[in-house]
Image (cartoon, rainbow, N blue to C red):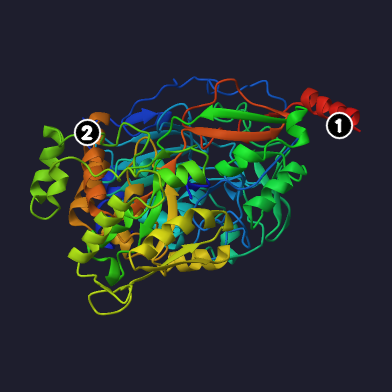
Amino acid sequence: MAQLSRRHVLALGVGGALGASLGTPLLRNAHASEAWTAAHGISAFGDLKYPADFRQFDYVNVDAPKGGAFSLIPSVRAYNQSYQTFNSLNAFILKGDGAQGMDMTFVSLMARANDEPDAMYGLAAKSVQISPDKLVYRFTMRPEAKFHDGTRLTAHDAAFSLTALKEKGHPLIIVQMRDMVSAEALDDATLVVTFAPKRARDVPLFVASLPIFSKAYYATRAFDESTLDVPLGSGPYKVGKFEVNRYIEYERVKDWWAADLPVCRGSFNFDVVRYEFYRDRDVAFEGFTGKNYLYREEFTSRIWATRYDFPAVKDGRVKLEITPDDTPSGAQGWFINTRRDKFKDPRVREALTYAFDYEWTNKTIMYGAYARTVSPFQNSDLMVTGGPPTPEELRLLEPFRGQVPDEVFGEPFVPPVSDGSGQDRALLRKAQQLLNEAGLVVKDGKRLLPNGEVFRIEFLAEEPSLQPHHAPYIKNLGTLGIDASLRLVDAVQYRARVEDFDFDMTIQRFSMSATPGDAMRAFFSSQAAATKGSYNLAGVASPAIDAMIEKIMAADSREELTVACRAFDRLFRAGRYWVPQWYNKTHRLAYWDQYSHPAKLPRYANGVGAPEIWWSDAAKAARIDNKLEQAK
């Protein structure tokens, strides 16, 4: 699935009749001559790196010591989570602000291998059998799997969980489970999951990654309610101490049933993982210098360039590390809410792109640390790099000729490059021309919409650190006669407004996996455009884009996937749904030097694999204490 992070500031039901026709009868009616495929793992295209008898993932340190504490601020969020706050321990529904880290308290059917693009191997399920038509997956549960209270985790719990998430989970989960018809337990050990014909390629992967809840626990509780009651989990950690809006701790389960499974060896090494919450990035930085938390990935270039010279850095107690980010960077930009009439004309949206001087912003505000984003598949081979469509792309795009801009069949749109002055006159003249062509004239210094109203744009933001990036853009819009302003709101109000699509423009960053699939619907489909709480902030509602998403999901090989993604890229760029911003090709890490990590971090880890595969280093911690004594 897709996830949002600081780097990413920024991953709907099948009808009942279809479910009846594709349920258990399919399992019974398979032809005797057609063999089911038995597997210890699954991937989008069936390729697996690790054999059935593998002992551990190559990238972990199986000798890593257990113990110590890892503390950080949130840098990745999903579903109802916030970077700045939390008020609920239910992190898989729409209501409330879910606590970071709750995923560590549950297990899923299978676990990701982070050195492969999308492969998963058995966790709660030890194996799976797949029907010849790949519409039925029969998982065999591990008999040793159990919840934290010692009760057994069975196929009945898994079936309950998948059904509840499909019906009552966060809208993004519901969208991605649209092609899951049913989940049924034949007995304690056997879970049968049935998918719809022409299902999205990655839906089984998504289903296998979802948390498994206790059916008995929710027999007396509402699944879809925000709550601070600690749910019954089965994962490597359980909820420890917490204070709403301030911090939450997770305690390692010392006798965890899955600790010695191949997918878990060398992982989950800290006794305590603690998340600290701050409303302001500058205040959060001061918290790090004061050792209120010990690990930080830096997402603000100004802070990285100017403030990592405090004493603990100089004397080596805090380590700075830059690691490459080879994963798809994704899309960051100001997304334009095309649901609003004033943004319906693509010429208006293009004019907004010409008004933004990226070169000045990068040089002056961000210390030249970034590169320009141009594509939702930035930093991957899925993006178009130039030239007209290839014959393979053209076969996908040709049916929409005349329905989409002619540009789709030529060079892909790339944001203009300014002279770096902050107010490039040539680009502003181009923006003015586009606005005039769209019927937005200037009267008494104000740009008027075709209906005679003043053209106003309110930028919605939740972090003060973004104010400097908005100011020069708003100034340029003012020179075009546009009445632009920034509205800064708290995290709760921001999420409520964004989920209700109550904004003009707002910053979002997201990245797709190396094998994008069903998650594309949540960000770009017409269905998601009309679904409150979805990530389709721009309101993209295009039959051509919908069709290309289906092609992406149906691709049978990586070659087909790449072609479909590039065709999608051309369509999305031609739609002018956003004002592209920037991306970073590295992770900038700062941490108190009492941690260690594997020498080679896995390419596809969420970030850099912290805290999952890091560990506490007692020798380093002792050196820190010695340096502190010497400093006194």
Q: Which residue is mark 2?
A: 560
Percent x, y for residue 273? Answer: 69, 42
Percent x, y for residue 270? Answer: 70, 35
Residue 242 appearing in the image: yes
Mark 1: which secondary structure?
A: helix
Q: Which residue is mark 1?
A: 628
Residue 107, placed above or below residue 315: below
Percent x, y for residue 543? Answer: 18, 56
Q: Residue at x 35, y 53 (%)?
A: 579
Q: State yes or no: discs 1 and 2 in contact (Cβ < 8 Å).
A: no
Of mark 1 and mark 2, the one earlier in the sequence is 2
Mark 2: which secondary structure?
A: helix
- In terms of depth relative to the viewer, which is nearer, 195 or 287? 287
Mark 1 or 2: in front is 1
Q: Residue at x 14, y 34 (%)?
A: 392
Image quadrant in which you'd find residue 75 = top right
Q: Quadrant of the C terminus?
A: top right
Percent x, y for residue 558? Answer: 27, 30
Q: State the CA–CA distance, disc 1 to disc 2.
A: 57 Å
Direction from residue 4 to residue 558 in the image, left or right: left
Q: Residue at x 67, y 60 (%)?
A: 245
Residue 224 appearing in the image: no
- In terms of depth relative to the viewer, which is nearer, 431 or 629? 431
Give neighbour class at mark 2: few <14, some 14-19, many 20+ (Cα, 10 Å).
some
Direction from residue 320 to residue 107 in the image, left or right: left
| Residue with the most extreme bottom position | 452
User: Of the residues shown, which amino acid type is indicated by label 2?
Assistant: Glu
Direction from residue 109 to residue 397 in the image, left or right: left
Residue 120, placed above or below residue 344: above
User: Of the residues shown, which amino acid type is indicated by label 1?
Assistant: Leu
